[in-house]
C-alpha cells in the first residue's frame, strides 16, 4: 500500500531561498532575517524589496522602489468598472480576484504567443511591483463601496502603510495605527510553501503568467482554513461578547467539537513566532483606542483555550481584533492579507520560473477496477493504444 501523505503533510517538494521556519529558534526568517526584527525596524517597502531581491535595500534603492510604487497606486478606470459590476454583497475576495484578473488582462493585451506572456525575470519583477502598488486601492475601494462611500485618490506624500489607511478611511492615521498596520503587513508577507503560495507555484510551473498564478493564490487564501481565519477570529470575538462569557462559550464550543479559529498551526509546534510581535501591536491599539475590553477578551480566551487544549494562537488571533480596532470591516481582513502576501507570492513565482519543473504529483486510485460498457466493441485504434507501453500522462 502506498504511503499517502494527506495534505502533503511532511513532504518536501522543492527548495526555496525566500523564507523558512528555523526550528532551533522557532522563528520565521525572510531571506535569513527574523521577521520580528524586520517588523520592528523596517517599512513594508523595504520588506517587499528584500523578498524580491534577496537583500534589504540601501537608501537609494528604497527611494527608487517607493517612487515606482507611488507612480502605480491609482485605481485604473477599467479595474474600478469591473469591481462596480459586482454586487456589494459579494465577498471582497471576489473583488480582489476580479481586479487582479483585469489588471493581468490589460498587461497581457496584444500578446498572442502564450510563451511571451510568461515574461522575463525583469518583466515579472516590474509586474510584481505594479500589482503590489495597486492592491491597496482595490482593497480600500472595496470597503468604501460597501459603505456607500466614494473612492479616495492616493497621496504620493505618504508611505505605503499610511497611504493604504488614507485611501480606506479618508483621513491621516495616527502614527501608532500606521506602525501597527505596517507591522501586520510585514508579518503576513510571506510564509514558505503555505497553501496559497504552493498554489501559485503550481500554476507558475505550467508556464502560465504571473497574474494567473496570483489569482489562483487568492482563491486558495479565501478559505477559512487559510487566510479566511482572521475573519473567523473576529466572528468568535463577536459571538462571545466579553471576557466574562469565555468560560461558558468555550464549554459549549468544545462540547460541540467546534474548530476554534485563530489557534494552532501545522508548522509551529511551540506557538506561532509571529504572535508576540502582532500582540504587542494590538496592545498599542488597545491603549490608543482605550479598549481594555478587547484585551480582556483576548487574554481570557487564549488562557482558557491553551489550558484546556494545549494549543497556542497563530497570527490570525491578534491580527483580527487589531484590524477591527483600526476600523476595517471584518470582510476586509483577508483582502488585507492579499495585499501583504502578494510580495511573497510573486517572489515564489519568480523563483519557480527561474528553476522550473512542472508540479504534477501522483495519486493512489481507490475506485472500481477496470470495467467495460456493455455492448461496446473496440475499434483498431483502441486495440493499438492498449498494446502500446504505458506513457506518462500530462
Image (cartoon, rainbow, N blue to C red):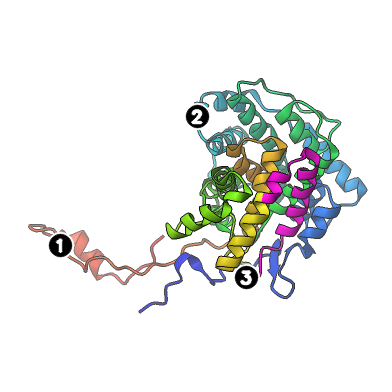
Tell me if residue 293 is in the magenta stretch: yes
First reached walking from the N terminus: tag 2 or tag 3: 2
Structural distance between the alpha carbons of marks 2 and 1: 48 Å
Residue 159 located left or right of residue 198:
right
Structural distance between the alpha carbons of marks 1 and 3: 50 Å
Tell me if residue 246 is in the magenta stretch: no
First reached walking from the N terminus: tag 2 or tag 1: 2
Numbered disc 3: secondary structure: loop
Give, as a single range, the part of the protein colored magenta.
270-296
Q: In this view, does 172 lie above or below 148?
A: below
Badge 3 density bin: few <14, some 14–19, many ≥20, Cα 10 Å: few
Numbered disc 2: secondary structure: loop
Q: Mark 2 points at which residue?
A: 89
Badge 1 density bin: few <14, some 14–19, many ≥20, Cα 10 Å: few
- Residue 176 in percent (x, y) is at 83, 42
Along the line of sight, the residue nearer the viewer: 357 or 202: 202
First reached walking from the N terminus: tag 1 or tag 3: 3
Locate the N terminus and report the quarter of the image it occupies: bottom left
- Image quadrant in which you'd find residue 14: bottom right
Q: Residue at x 55, y 44 (%)?
A: 235
Numbered disc 1: secondary structure: loop
- Residue 389 in percent (x, y) is at 31, 72
- Most extreme residue toward the left is 375
Q: Name the residue under label 1.
A: 372
Q: Is the magenta stretch mostly helix, strand or loop?
A: helix
Q: Name the residue under label 3.
A: 269
Nearer the camera: disc 2 or disc 1 = 2
- Residue 148 in percent (x, y) is at 60, 21
Locate the C terminus and report the quarter of the image it occupies: bottom left
Q: Is residue 276 above or below residue 319?
A: below
Badge 2 density bin: few <14, some 14–19, many ≥20, Cα 10 Å: few
Amino acid at each position: 500500500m502506498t504511503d499517502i501523505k494527506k495534505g502533503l503533510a511532511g513532504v518536501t517538494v522543492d527548495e526555496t531561498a525566500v523564507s523558512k521556519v528555523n526550528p532551533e529558534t522557532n522563528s520565521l526568517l525572510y531571506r535569513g532575517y527574523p521577521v520580528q526584527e524586520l517588523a520592528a525596524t523596517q517599512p513594508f517597502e523595504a520588506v517587499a524589496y528584500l523578498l524580491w531581491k534577496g537583500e534589504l535595500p540601501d537608501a537609494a534603492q528604497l527611494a527608487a522602489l517607493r517612487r515606482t510604487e507611488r507612480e502605480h497606486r491609482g485605481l485604473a478606470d477599467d479595474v474600478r468598472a469591473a469591481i462596480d459590476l459586482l454586487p456589494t454583497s459579494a465577498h471582497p475576495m471576489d473583488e480582489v480576484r476580479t481586479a487582479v484578473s483585469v489588471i493581468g488582462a490589460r498587461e497581457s493585451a496584444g500578446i498572442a504567443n502564450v510563451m511571451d506572456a510568461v515574461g522575463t525575470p525583469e518583466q515579472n519583477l516590474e509586474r510584481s511591483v505594479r500589482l503590489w502598488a495597486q492592491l491597496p486601492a482595490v482593497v480600500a475601494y472595496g470597503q468604501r463601496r460597501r459603505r456607500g462611500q466614494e473612492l479616495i485618490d492616493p497621496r504620493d506624500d505618504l508611505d505605503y502603510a499610511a497611504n493604504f489607511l488614507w485611501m480606506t478611511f479618508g483621513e491621516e492615521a495616527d502614527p501608532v495605527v500606521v506602525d501597527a498596520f505596517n507591522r501586520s503587513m510585514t508579518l503576513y508577507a510571506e510564509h514558505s510553501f503555505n497553501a496559497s503560495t504552493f498554489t501559485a507555484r503550481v500554476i507558475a510551473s505550467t508556464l502560465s503568467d504571473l497574474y494567473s498564478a496570483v489569482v489562483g493564490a487568492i482563491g486558495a487564501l479565501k478559505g477559512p482554513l487559510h487566510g479566511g481565519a482572521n475573519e473567523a477570529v473576529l466572528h468568535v470575538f463577536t459571538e462571545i461578547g466579553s471576557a466574562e462569557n469565555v468560560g461558558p462559550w468555550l464549554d459549549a464550543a468544545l462540547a460541540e467539537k467546534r474548530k476554534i479559529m485563530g489557534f494552532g498551526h501545522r508548522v509551529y509546534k511551540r506557538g506561532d513566532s509571529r504572535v508576540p510581535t502582532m500582540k504587542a501591536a494590538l496592545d498599542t491599539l488597545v491603549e490608543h483606542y482605550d479598549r481594555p475590553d478587547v484585551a480582556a477578551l483576548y487574554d481570557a480566551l487564549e488562557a482558557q483555550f491553551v489550558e484546556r487544549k494545549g494549543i497556542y494562537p497563530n497570527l490570525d488571533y491578534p491580527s483580527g481584533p487589531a484590524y477591527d480596532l483600526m476600523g476595517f470591516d471584518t470582510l476586509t481582513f483577508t483582502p488585507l492579507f492579499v495585499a501583504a502576501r502578494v510580495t511573497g507570492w510573486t517572489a515564489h513565482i519568480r523563483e519557480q520560473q527561474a528553476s522550473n519543473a512542472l508540479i504534477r504529483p501522483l495519486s493512489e486510485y481507490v475506485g472500481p477496477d477496470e470495467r467495460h460498457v456493455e455492448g461496446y466493441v473496440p475499434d483498431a485504434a483502441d486495440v493499438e493504444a492498449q498494446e502500446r507501453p504505458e506513457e506518462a500522462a500530462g
